[in-house]
Every structure is written in structure tokens, then in C-alpha cells.
Amino acid sequence: MLTRLDDKVALVTGGARGIGREISLELARLGTKLAVNYRSSSAEAESLVEEIKQIGSECQIIQADVSKKDQARGLVQQVLDHYGQLDILVNNAGITKDKTLKKLTDDDWEDVINTNLNSVYYTVSAALPNMLERQHGRIINISSFVGQAGNFGQSNYAASKGGIIAFTKSAAQEVAKNNITINAIAPGFTETDMLSQVPENIREQILSKIPMRRFGKPNEIARAVVFLAADGDYITGQQINVNGGVYM
């Protein structure tokens, strides 16, 4: 049984749908007070709040585009203003704009890097002062096996997710002495809206490359995140692969 988190406050970016939604729900079940960030999924965010309240946890939703530094840092400040502390930061927000390099535009590159990678720097740098003052923090960044192995037509996505792993390892070294852990989760192909957009024939090709012969479920990623938040006290600077064996 995981340690209860009744006195903790968590912020989940991109928390209204998919993996972020499941992370928010798992944290709520452990008693965490939540701040759920969304960019455009307002209806999903409102629905999630109601579900979290039924669980018995407190939750606020905050609209912000974390690809923009002022909004990302303002998001963290809103959490601190509301709750007075931030114990758990989950950087989950992410997008894809998949194209081969010969078709990739500067906007495609910058949008993915800003949303997936730069946002992690913005939120972590904003959250650290409070965590350092309180000598406690758990930061979990959602990367991808694509950041480790690469993938055809995803050079921008791979660069952003690989950057998250490198950032995680470097930042973790700086704050380990302050009882702040920073880790990355690297999911494989997971059943989300992003995967549902992939044509069926391509999905079959993907499945043939996964040793476990199935896609991951969002709650399987969420449970790994919540373990790090609740009981991963001596784990830092790591990337944990939850991928069905697609990259070993």
C-alpha cells in the first residue's frame, strides 16, 4: 500500500485528459490536494474536478499554456498563492507534430520543443524556491521511449523527450541534498487520444514491435508516477521505462 499524501499539494500539467487525468485521479486517491492544469480542454477539466471531489480530495483547475514562460511560471505561482506550498510537480503536458525532416517546419519544431521541453524548465525553475525553502519536493517529468530510441518522423518529439531525460539527470544532482527528487517516466505506446489518431494498419505494425503485444494503459503510467511521489524517497535522477518492452 502506498504512503498517504494527505498533507501534500500536487500540480499536474496537461492534467485534464489521458495520462495526466489518470495521474490526477491516482494522486487524489492518496489524499493529495490538487491543481490540474489544462490549455484548451475546459470541459474535461471540469468533469475531472467533479470526479476528484467525489473521491474526497480538494482540486482547483488552472488554464495556462505552459509553452509560454510567463504563463507556466504564473501557473506555479497560482498554486502557491492558493495552497501556500507545492510538494509534487508532474510535468505531463505534451504535443506531437510528426513529420519527416524534409517536411518539418520551424513552427513544428518550436511548438513541440516549447510545449514538451521548455515548459519543464519553466515550471521547475518556478517551483524550486518553495521546495528548497521547505527542504522537500518530488518532481516527475513525463518523457517517452522515443527520447531514448528515436522514431521515424518524430525528430522534434524525440529531441524534446530526450532533452527531458538529460534535464532530469542534471537537475536532480543539484537538489538531491535538499530532499528534492527529480525523475522521469518514459512511457511506450499508450492508449490515449494521441495514439487513437494513428491509422489501424500502423497500429498493428506498432503492436508487432512490442514484446508484450499490447499498448499501455494510462493508469499504468500513473501508478509509476504516484509511486515516485509517495514512496520513491531514495530514487532520483532516473528514467523509469513503462513501455511493455518496446525499448530495453
Image (tube, grey):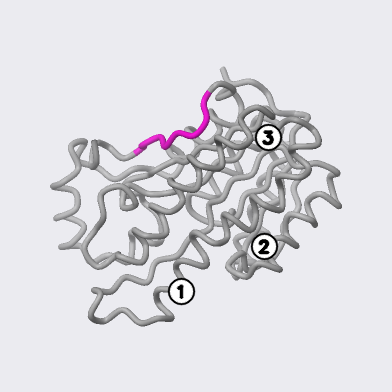
Residue at the image position 75 percent from the left and 30 percent from the top: 135
Identify the residue at image location x=60%, y=54%: 13
Residue 208: percent from the left, percent from the top?
13, 47
Query: What amino acid is found at the position of numbered circle 1 in the picture?
Result: Glu
Number of other residues with Cα within 10 Å of mark 1, as a class: few under 14, some 14 to 19, many 20 or more? some
Magenta residues, start to end: 235-242
Q: How many marks?
A: 3
Q: Position of residue 244 (x, y in %)?
A: 27, 37
Mark 3 vs 1, N-terminal side:
1
Q: How far is disc 1 from disc 2 in space, using C-alphas?
A: 16 Å
Residue at the spot of label 2: 72
Amino acid bearing label 2: Ala
**On the picture, is 62 further left or further right than 2?**
right
Locate residue 84: give its quadrant: top right
- Disc on res. 110: 1
Pick whichever, 181 or 75, lies toward us.
Answer: 181
State the mark number for residue 137.
3
Distance CA(mark 3)–CA(mark 1): 30 Å
